[in-house]
Image (spheres, helix red, strand yellow):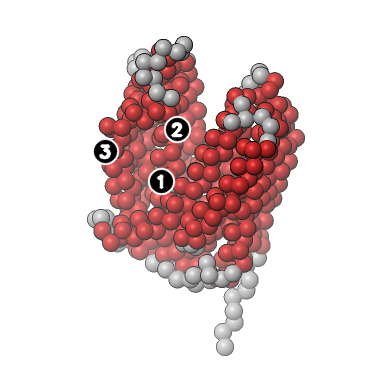
Amino acid sequence: MTTPDPAPRPRSLNRQIAALAVPALGALLAEPVFLLIDAAIVGHLGTAQLAGVGIASVVLGTTIGLAVFLAYGTTSMVARSLGAGDLRSATAAGMDGIYLALLIGVAVILVGLPTAGPIVDLLAGGSGGSPAEGAGLIADAVGFGTTYLLISLAGIPAMLVVLATNGVLRGLQDTRTPLWVAVAGAVLNTVLNLLFVNGFHWGVAGSAIGTVITQNLMAATLAALVIVNARRQGASLRPHLRGIGTSGRTGLPLLLRTVWLRLAILLTTVVAARLGLAALAAHQVVMSIWNFLALGLDAIAIAAQALTGKALGAGDATLARSLTRAMLRWGIVAGTVIGAVLLAGHAVVGGGFSADPAVRAAIAAALVVTSIAQPLSGFVFVLDGVLIGAGDGWYLAWTGLLNLVAYLPALLAVVVFAPGGATGLGWLWVAFGGVYMAARAVTLYLRYRGDRWLVVGA
């Protein structure tokens, strides 16, 4: 009779989580630095240049955001194969993810080249020769934005490869390498942007060129590391249609999950615009803060993806549950701490973004709700990561749509009953941070309580 393995100790579980989550947090925080650096350097060129780059950045950010399944899906597949002791299959799955990223990147370029100008013009509200005051400035912004976007298309395949390779390395339980590459990329991006914009006076084009060079060097570095590992394990480096197809099928439900999430955020912004200009300006600030704070909780979710996939791949459902319980504690505690800090400073944060008293009051009102919602967010982000790591993508896709449907009545209630200004924005964030996140929490918890997500094996 064999003796069952002893239950893992909490301290051991916490070490595993910290070893992945802390470097992942550093890498996640390094990513927004790209946009901040570009904005800071371009901002000194003029208002039209800054506005144009801002519009182009929305398009690029949306594209990369929708493709995040390349990282999530690859993490799950690689971690499962690693847990099953099949490193060759793990690295082969990673190579398939890289080839899929390249194919999608080429497709984005082919679509983007003829549509970049119209898309920027649409987001700018259409310059179209309007006689309204400021139309010339808008037209200039469209021109700068189109230039930036067209050049930046050359970096899209590289950024998608970065996503895929990050997924491979996370699946292999390595979040340190992506951290160092992200930090090095941020430093190089700064140097090149300063050189091309301020040294060579290439303007907006120089900023885009510097960022594209950095993105391609990052992708080449990470891809080289994955290729070396694949050769070491004897995995084929050639593209395999079946493997690429598997990566695509794995990523499809995660793409749908992300679409529903992005749509919920978009609809929230649409409602904020109905609450007045001050409320809309404040909402953009609060949403930026929300996204920044989410990075800290996402680091735990990344650890959840990698550790859950590995445990299930090893056939250890008990360990997967133990890890999930530990990571849920991490998520709730981190959310509580973040929320407490945010609540303590909610009244003064607005001063750093606007001198308008109405905007500052609306920011303060929304941040109170946001701070209270942080523990719930920690719970949601961790369980979301666990189910992604378990490969339970279709459940996340269908319940993502269900969560969006449940959120719509709350949004409608804000439109019909909420006043404008700070009070209305506060109620809007009750709807988003409370109703929408609570809907996600319920559907995730119902899945977690059962065993259908605990599918073991490679």
- In this orientation, does residue 177 appear? no
Q: Residue at x 46, y 11 (%)?
A: 133
Q: Earlier in the sequence, mark 1 or mark 3?
A: 1
| Figure check: 79 above or below 7 | above
**Residue 130 quadrant:** top left
Q: Are marks 1 and 2 in contact (CB under 8 Å)?
A: no
Q: Residue at x 64, y 48 (%)?
A: 435
Q: Quadrant of the N terminus?
A: bottom right
Residue type at the position of mark 1: Ala
Q: CA distance from mark 1 to mark 2?
A: 14 Å
Residue type at the position of mark 2: Val
Neighbours of disc 2 within 10 Å: few (<14), some (14-19), many (20+): few
**Residue 203 quadrant:** top left
Element type where label 3 sits in the image: helix
Image position, residue 151 (x, y; %): 32, 28
Residue at the limit of the structure toward the right, as seen here: 344
Image position, residue 406 (x, y; %): 59, 52
- Disc marking residue 58: 2
> In front: 446, or 40?
446
Q: CA distance from mark 2 to mark 3?
A: 19 Å
- Disc marking residue 67: 1
Element type where label 1 sits in the image: loop
- Disc marking residue 110: 3
Residue at the limit of the structure toward the front, as seen here: 416
Neighbours of disc 1 within 10 Å: few (<14), some (14-19), many (20+): many
| Figure check: 411 above or below 239 | above
Q: Residue at x 40, y 40 (%)?
A: 63
Residue type at the position of mark 3: Leu
> In front: 251, or 275?
275
Q: Earlier in the sequence, mark 2 or mark 3?
A: 2
| Figure check: 112 above or below 49 | below
